[in-house]
Image (tube, rainbow, N blue to C red):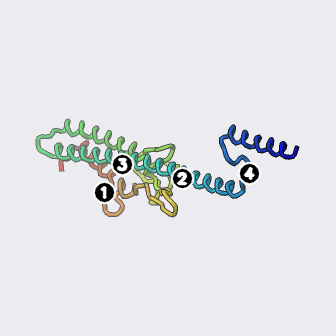
Amino acid sequence: VRDLSRNSKELQEVQESISSGKRINKPSDDPLGASQALDYRKTLSRIDQLNRNIAWGKSWLDFTDSGLSQVSDLINRAKEIAISQSSATASQSSRAASAAEVEQLSQQLLQIANTKLSGRYIFAGQRTNQQPFEQDGAYKGDAGEVSIVVGPGLNMTISSDAGKVFKGSGGGEDIFSVLTEMKTALENNAPA
């Protein structure tokens, strides 16, 4: 009877293991194995989190790259306008039309500078929940870096310093001011 009871219990455990697809259904089945299984789960969870971090960081970098590429295109277009409208062949009406185009470029620049990814502003430094640029081009972000964890003890910075990119801090030009001055000069028919 005892052997029959033991065999019945073992059969039940085997059937439970087969139906669940797991070798260990409760810690008492294999205490050492259960401990190892928990360690494996923690490791897999960390790896999944790192993969999510990396995917999110890649999206952030792709958005930043796209935005900076668009900024470069806008600056090149503004240069083309400046060169064409500084010549003696340009007229007051062509400069007025170009002033309107420069205004559009300025608005496009503002939209790019305030680009969001998943509800976060990518050019705001660490103030990602606050719009970094106001309508007049004033910067409300900070110079803080946004970084992600990509491995044990490994962080990667994914943000760009918008103060350097758009406002010229560190020796560059304030793109918003340059476009505003250019628009004013075109409206005043001042080719210089």
- 102 w.r.t. 159: above or below: above
**Amino acid under disc 4:** Asp
* CB under 8 Å between discs 1 and 4: no
Identify the element where label 1 is drawn. loop
The residue under the point 34% across, 50% down is: 176
The residue under the point 33% across, 55% down is: 174
Q: Which mark is residue 47?
A: 2
The residue pinned by badge 1 equals 173
Q: Rounded to the nearest whole Å, what is the CA distance between mark 1 and mark 4? A: 69 Å
Identify the element where label 2 is drawn. helix
The disc, 3 or 4, on the residue closer to the chain's N-terminal end is 4
The residue pinned by badge 4 equals 29
The disc, 1 or 3, on the residue closer to the chain's N-terminal end is 3
Which of label 2 and label 1 is nearer to you?
A: 2
* CB under 8 Å between discs 1 and 3: no
Q: Rounded to the nearest whole Å, what is the CA distance between mark 4 and mark 2? A: 27 Å
**Amino acid under disc 2:** Ile
Q: Which mark is residue 65?
A: 3
Identify the element where label 4 is drawn. helix
Q: Rounded to the nearest whole Å, what is the CA distance between mark 3 and mark 2? A: 26 Å
Nearest the camera: 156 or 151? 151
Please provide percent x and percent y for residue 179. Answer: 30, 48
